[in-house]
Every structure is written in C-alpha cells, then in structure tokens.
Amino acid sequence: MAILQDMNPHDVLRGVGLEEKEVEVYMALLEYGEATVLQVSRKAGVKRPTAYLVLSDLEAKGFVSRITKGKKTLFAPQHPKKILTEAEIKLNEIKSALPQFEAMLNKSDDRPRIMIYEGKDALDRAYDDVFIVKGEVLFMNNTALVEDVFERTLNKWNYATLSENFLLREIIDDSEASHLYASKVSGKYRHIRFMPKEFSPFATEVAIFGNNTLITSGKKEYFTVKIESKDIADAFRAMFEAMWLLSKESTGV
C-alpha cells in the first residue's frame, strides 16, 4: 500500500503544466527521437493540424526543438531533464511568492472553516496540508477505502521523512489486507493498531492533524469534509485516544 512505486510519466508531465494532448505528443516524440508532424500525429493519435499546433506550443515552452533537414521539417524532444528543470523553476517561483500568500491569509477569524471536497479525484487535495503542518498525524480508516481513494497521497508518504516531529498513528480495520499493510509500513515513527472487529466494516476515514479534522466517505459517493478548528480537532483526538486503548497492537514491526 505504501510501497515506493514508479511514477506514471503522463502524471509527471501533467504535473509540470502540460495539457493532455501536449503530454501525448511529447511522449510520442520521445519514442521517435525526431519525427515529422505526420509521424507524431499518427503515434499520438491526433489529427495532423492539431499535432502541428501542439508541437508549436511545446516548442514555445521549451520542450521541443524544430530541425530543418533539406526541405523537411522535423521536431525533436528536449532531454527529459527539462522536466526536472521546469519543476524546479515552478518550485522556486512558489517559494518566492510564499511570504505574500501567507500575509494574505486571514487569521483573525476564529470561527471553524469548513470545506467540502467532492469526487474521487478531488479528495487527495484535502490531505495536502498534512505534509505542511506535520506534528502528529492520527488516522482511523479502512485499508480498502484508503487504497481505492488515496493513491496520490499514499505515493506522497513514500517521499515523506518521518521523525520525532512528524509522527503517524493509525487505527485500521482488522483485515488480512490491513495486516499486510501494517507489516510493510510500521516503524519507529509510524505505529498501527487494529480496531475491534465489532466496529467493522469501518467505511469512513477520519484524519486529525494540527487544527484539522477530515472525514471521508467512499462507500457510495466520494466526499471529504475538512474542518479547521482547534476545539473540534481536540475533541476528535480524545475519541481517537479512546479507540487506541481499545485497539489491538500491530506486530508488523
């Protein structure tokens, strides 16, 4: 479940700002090394005029070079390290703007903030703050639900460095899949217990970190409710601790 996996190249390219057709055209060009517009259009499965426009856009973004050989115009992909360079540029731009973004946050209002994320593709975004807030993160969940809904977040945990200042405790359902998961990910800074069987099936995920409480349903309709409130987070922490005492320790370490 949280084993390091190779990233999908299409997802990586989308992550640096390429549109879907740009991804397909760039991937097609990588396989050729250099090619005509017609070759690229056939490989990428797009019409020739579309391929030309997309190649021109990629050229403007620095992902593609135009080559003239006699009367023939060819296109060649820039080295894939260009992707890393683009990602680093975007990261540095975000870092530069971060003080301005933080200054714009309205921290004077103590009322709870409630956000709702709907649709399977949107749910992972609700958890992005967990990697910023850090501290201790508490989860109560069902392994099958997490594997189904939170693939992107699980991949992020592969790159997260846990420490005394960034801890995980998880209470998960007592299933074969959960025991396998626990045996793979339990460690010094990641502790897992199995909830009593009478609480199964547990078709919801609850996460608590910082002043955030997230409740996710993935049984029929995919949605996450995110509540930013210290009082509510503290109340759910108390519920978690009560369940922790009732739960069975993992022997996966």
Image: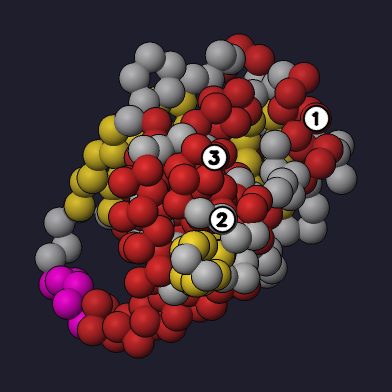
Q: Amino acid at mark 1?
A: Leu
Q: Amino acid at mark 2?
A: Ala
Q: Tell me the element at label 1.
A: helix
Q: Amino acid at mark 3?
A: Lys
Q: Nearer the viewer, mark 2 or mark 1?
A: 2
Name the main secondary structure of what is drawn in magenta. loop
Residue at the spot 37% in from the left edge and 43% down from the top edge: 48
Residue at the spot 72% in from the left edge and 58% down from the top edge: 189
Q: Nearer the viewer, mark 1 or mark 3?
A: 3
In the image, which residues are magenta? 103-108
Q: Nearer the viewer, residue 155 or 13?
A: 13
Q: Tell me the element at label 2.
A: loop
Mark 1 Cα-neighbour bin, 10 Å: few <14, some 14–19, many ≥20: few
Q: Earlier in the sequence, mark 2 or mark 1?
A: 2
Residue 153 at x, y = what percent?
A: 53, 47
Q: Nearer the viewer, residue 38 or 84?
A: 38
Q: Nearer the viewer, residue 182 or 13?
A: 13
Residue at the spot 56% in from the left edge and 32% down from the top edge: 146
Q: Are marks 3 and 2 in contact (CB under 8 Å)?
A: yes
Q: Earlier in the sequence, mark 3 or mark 2?
A: 2
Find disc 3 in the rendering and name its residue. Answer: 43
Asked if one can make out residue 100 in the rendered structure from this viewpoint, the answer is yes
Which numbered dot is residue 180?
Answer: 1
